[in-house]
Amino acid sequence: MRTFIFFLCTLTALTLRAQQHTLESQIRQVSKSIRAQVGVAVIIDGKDTVTVNNDSRYPLMSVVKYPQSLAVAHFLHLHNRPLSTEVFIAKEALHPDTYSPLRDEYPEGNLYLPISRLLEYTLQQSDNNACDILFEYIGGVLYAERYIRSLGAECLAISKTEEQMYQAPESCYENWSSPLEMARLTDMLFSKELFPSDYQNFIKETMLNCVTGENRLPQPLMNTTARIGHKTGTSGLNARGELAGINDVGFVILPDGRRYSIAVLIKDSKETMKATEKVIADISEIVYRYLTLP
């Protein structure tokens, strides 16, 4: 009887490894279809993990706003402050030459807004001014990096604000991560109690309402009942005429309750924006079909 049970366990493990290999092979094939470095990580139900081209540093671009949100929530909890805590936004903090729906809505500045609203601007609309206002509020980029590293994230660096990257575009490579580190951080929203649930649930719900990058990870899920929360990152061209970083990181909740975290980070793409984003959508579709088709 013990021999039979051992045989079944071994067979199950071998089958699982074969399935993971199949998923990895499909992702690798798509990853090779463009002139870029494509890194992918998928964590299924908090345990089964697949990675492709994980051993590199990928510039995060605005994906950094997700780990930043965790650091902001930690700061609020540490200082016993609610998400409704208001921050003064001076007109000088609303830089004109950057993407900022916050500035477009309040061009004169000099007003108070709650932290929750600033997080909505960063996580849902990828607002660069709101991002730097939040960095200043918690004490700078190094506070965010220290907190994220305290969670066990070693393959990650946060050292530049949005304004610093605007002033020196090549410095965008100094905010970096491996795909697996970003997938792990996303999975933590479900697998670990980082801080009280009101903060954690707010971040989840805010990401579920992201409005950027609909033609990336969300694209193949649009006509399904799956729910996706995600955060995009988008660069301009580097000095070599390449797209420095085109990214999407998120979590998917399937109708049957299963979930997975996924990170697709694309570095130094020589392709068009459309072609680069399509690779992210294609990889998203491969993972979704792998988990849902019989």
Image (cartoon, grey):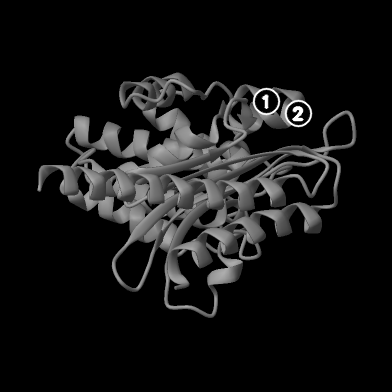
As drawn, the label of residue 169 is 2
Q: Choose between 14 and 191: the one closer to the eye.
A: 14
Q: Amino acid at mark 2?
A: Pro
Q: Name above or below for residue 249 compared with residue 291.
A: above
Image quadrant holding the C terminus, namely: bottom left
In the image, taking residue 84 as reference, residue 238 lies left or right, namely right
Q: Is residue 246 in view from this perspective?
A: yes
Q: Is residue 89 in view from this perspective?
A: no
Q: Which residue is mark 1?
A: 173
Q: Choose between 200 and 285: the one closer to the eye.
A: 285
Quarter of the rendering containing residue 38: top right
In the image, taking residue 198 as reference, residue 274 lies left or right, namely right
Measured as percent of width and height from the top left, residue 177 is found at 54, 29
In the image, taking residue 162 as reference, residue 119 lies left or right, namely left
Q: Amino acid at mark 1?
A: Tyr
In the image, taking residue 83 as reference, residue 138 lies left or right, namely right
